[in-house]
Image (spheres, helix red, strand yellow):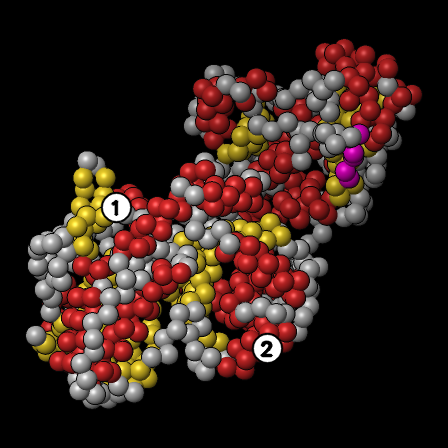
Amino acid sequence: MNRYINPAADLNCGSGDDLQLDWAGVEGAHALPLSAAQLGIWFAAQLDACPFAYNIGEYIEIDGPIDPALFEQALRQIVSETETLRVRITERAGQPHQVVGDPPTFSLPLIDVSTEADARAAAEAWMRVDLAQPFAPMQGPLFAFALFKASPARFFWYARYHHIIMDAFGMSLVARRVAEVYTQLSLCRTSPEESFGSLAVLLKDDAAYRTSERFRQDRKYWCDRLLDRPESVSLGAQTSAASAAFLRHTLYLPAATGHRLRSLAGARGTSLSRVIGAAAAVFLHRLSGERDLVLGLPVAARTGAARFIPGMASNVLPLRLLVHPGMSISAVIDETASQIKQGLEHQHYQLADLRRDLRGLAEGRSPFGLNVNIMRFNYDVTFAGHHVTAHNLSLGPVSDLSIAVYERSTGALLRIDFDANPALHAPRDLAARAQRFLRLLTAIAEADCALGSVDILGAGERASILRGWNATAHASAAATLAELFAAQAARSPEAVAVVFEDERLSYAELDRRANRLAHHLRGQGVGAETVVGLCLVRSLDLIVGLLGILKAGGAYLPLDPDYPRERLAFMLSDAGARVLITHAATQAAIEPALQGAPAAGLLARLVRLDGDAAAIAACPASAPAVALDPHNAAYVIYTSGSTGTPKGVVIGHGSLTNLLRAMQEQVRPDRNDGFAAITNIGFDIAALELFLPLICGARLGIVPKDTVSDPPGLAQAVARAAGTIPPSNPDPLARTRDKP
């Protein structure tokens, strides 16, 4: 019975009411096991929280008038003769089985969208709503159909299936058979019922394969092939998330490009589908930078009689390719064709089995960040002489990113669908990637070149990346760190600059003490490019020492007193340090290093901040006049030496102040902020940690070394740095006031 449905009433409400199908009963029914492919779908569906995730669907656009009554008659005949359309799922002893029963009773909605402003959009909106209607596998039926009238001479036949009974190849078989029967009926001929073949044939072939030597050989092939597999490469967000819906961006390859790609395939002795597979690998390589790639390659996994029986038999093969920027496009095509050919010889070994064999394969995520699905099913059919175009709506869940290419007619444009998990990919990014893939295909079609030289960027993207993103230059007054700190000290002289336990220094106090030390160091011959070792425990004097060296024009060499004496001796010698700033107690601890070091003879002077306090205090409190170039050294820092001898790296004043100013623009700290310094000064990040607060007027809290590894103590130290814990000394500045 055909029913015309008012789209205005039904497009915005659940359309499933119009497709409720009643199972006619199970008289004469017989139970069959599920194939390995079906079991993979069954168990995945049980784990999926979305009841419609495994719906697949398409619609066939018929370019001509259709007789709805004859169309329904054709459909009923196909349902009657197709066992997979008469299946429902049962459970026996906890195991799923499939029961093939009598033909179900169903109605075919006929939906008139011809009066809509956009008939296709109206029809597709209805279809999307229906695709979200769940099937009841244990009740059946597991299919649904509808017919849309877009105009008197254009119709859409919509089909929805549960993936457990149908794959894309099976949909093509059903579509061809419906077209054949309808054509015969339109010619007033009776189309004889012809069985596609029994599901039992598929299941017996599957069972025989799984107990065969070939199964064991296939298993060994894939395990060996993926034993040292790389991590899954994804172009999406670095997270694992499932989504019932998926994003889709569709584009069409220009006819000229498609023609050139087919010519290229012929010249390489392969097929267009394998050229597309190679392009997908190049695409993933260029966007990720990875060279060892594993892509997913969906395959029909059918041979012999199985190619004529609708059902669920498809599989996904791992396509592993090694590529590098200097490799030519033709070499990638040849390697892809070779690997696909080898993989197809082992295509019946199910991915679900492989994931069990290789425990940890993707660890619950999709084993492939990218699937490339080449749909080569022949849709060159007609309904009573009227040509058709197939439009896929869903191929099932999309775990990450899938590229589906529809190569269904030599005369039609190649349709390319980019399907993506919306939890991992944004619509804008998906559209941009689809356009890059289109540019890549165009480049491959035009010339054979190295992968690294293939241009996949649009003019706007190229301008943004090469010019926009690199347009970081801006006017910046030349100033050393010492000058930046002095300017801040003048702006907020009474603000607290640095805190260590119960001791504090204001900006004015810290500036005066550093100035006095700088004058003292100038008297020791310190100037531009003079390396001054600084070996102090974490304290206020550590900050005074750093600033004093920089104000004198020297370059500080950070030395941790706890370093092995051999390392300290090497650094002093290798850096050519002429002066060493320390405390008497620290000097005693490192004396063996000084005595045994080649640097001992180079050191012109030891400056002890405690022993020489009187001499330092006698120096002027104003800053010494020092002329420095941005290229002059600010500090020298050494690598760990894990790959050999430690190496000294010289950091200039310009580099240091550029970093600090850039971070100041991003973080924008002020006098209300507090920073806790916890990093060993021998690490490069310590310069940012120590100096950024001091050029912004913020409070710097020096955390003792032992406290860094003590969570409660560290929390208290951070709070003290932020000013939320008052010192135990009611007048902490009294302890340091007027000290040098």
State the quadrant of the C terminus: top right
Q: Which residue is mark 1?
A: 33
Amino acid type, mark 1: Pro
Mark carried by residue 452: none
The answer to which quarter of the image holds residue 339 is bottom right
Magenta residues?
Answer: 645-650
Q: Is residue 486 visible?
A: yes
Label 2 and label 1: CA atoms lie apart by 46 Å
The answer to which quarter of the image holds residue 690 is top right
Residue 621 painted magenta: no
Q: Residue at x 10, y 58 (%)?
A: 23
- Examine the rendered structure and indicate whether residue 574 appears above or below residue 502: below
Q: Looking at the picture, how far across and down is residue 383, in whole percent?
A: 27, 82
State the quadrant of the N terminus: bottom left
Looking at the rendered structure, the number of numbered marks drawn on it comes to 2
The answer to which quarter of the image holds residue 541 is top right
Q: Which residue is mark 2?
A: 263
Residue 646 painted magenta: yes
Numbered disc 2: secondary structure:
helix
Q: Looking at the picture, how far across and down is residue 306, in whole percent?
A: 36, 59
- Examine the rendered structure and indicate whether residue 654 appears above or below residue 417: above
Q: Residue at x 26, y 58 (%)?
A: 198
Q: Looking at the picture, how far across and down is residue 551, in whole percent?
A: 74, 36
